[in-house]
Image (spheres, rainbow, N blue to C red):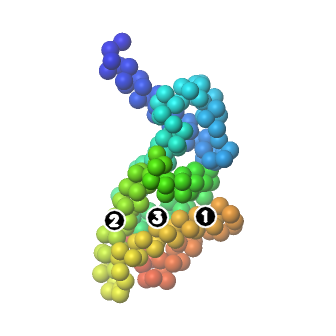
Amino acid sequence: MSARGEYAKGVQRREEILEAALTVFARSGYQGTSLREVAEVTGMTPAGLLHYFGTREAMLTEVVRRKEELARATANGASVLPRMGRSLRMNADVPGLVRLQAVLAAQAADPEHPAHEYFVERYGGIRERLEADLRERIAARGLDLDATKVAAILIAVADGIQLQWMLDPSIGMADHFDYLLAALGLDATDDDS
């Protein structure tokens, strides 16, 4: 087999591992999932998994990245603000992934953590896109709001409401987020996307 064929097989196997890990973490969460469980689902050994990712943290980062990619793929061109509410609604169905992302993001605050750069880029990108979306909405509604500050605050609110939901699942993440948007005059339900 050519090196190109082996590379393609390796990429395909890595994708299969990520899909399995996504499913396992969605069901069992960060604490409840071991490399061994993901390995069993994929018919591999834990060492075999690490061959594709290097470390457990690198695999977890890729699982979070995959979750984000799937959310963007299902956005159908919607702008950032309405997507945030939809994301909070969808996250209620995958508590394990929400916990994984929260734990990994907190650990990645350490600059030495393997996921540090990913989360720095992730939050920076979301903030930048959200800020642009907010500038348009604020101008269209004639509101006296600072898009830069509101973007950072809305991201903090989304993360914080998810944390509260993890502790008390009766809290409606998206409902609370939508309430805040309406209170700010930024109701995103009028988005056509």
- The front one of 167 and 77 is 167
- Tell me the crowding category of disc 1: few under 14, some 14 to 19, or many 20 or more residues within 10 angstroms, Cα based: some
Visible in this render: residue 90?
A: no
Q: Is residue 48 left or right of residue 133?
A: right
Residue kind at label 1, given as amino acid type: Leu
- The front one of 111 and 188 is 111
Label 2 sits on a secondary structure element that is helix
Q: Which residue in the structure is indicated by mark 3? A: 84
Label 3 sits on a secondary structure element that is helix
Report the residue at 48% width, 33% height from top: 54
Q: Which mark is residue 61?
A: none
- Residue 146, compared with residue 39, is above or below; it is below
Residue kind at label 2, given as amino acid type: Glu
- Tell me the crowding category of disc 3: few under 14, some 14 to 19, or many 20 or more residues within 10 angstroms, Cα based: many
Between the C-alphas of marks 3 and 2, the distance is 14 Å
Residue kind at label 3, given as amino acid type: Met
- Residue 154, compared with residue 23, is above or below; it is below
Q: Which residue in the structure is indicated by mark 1? A: 163
Q: Which residue in the structure is indicated by mark 2? A: 128
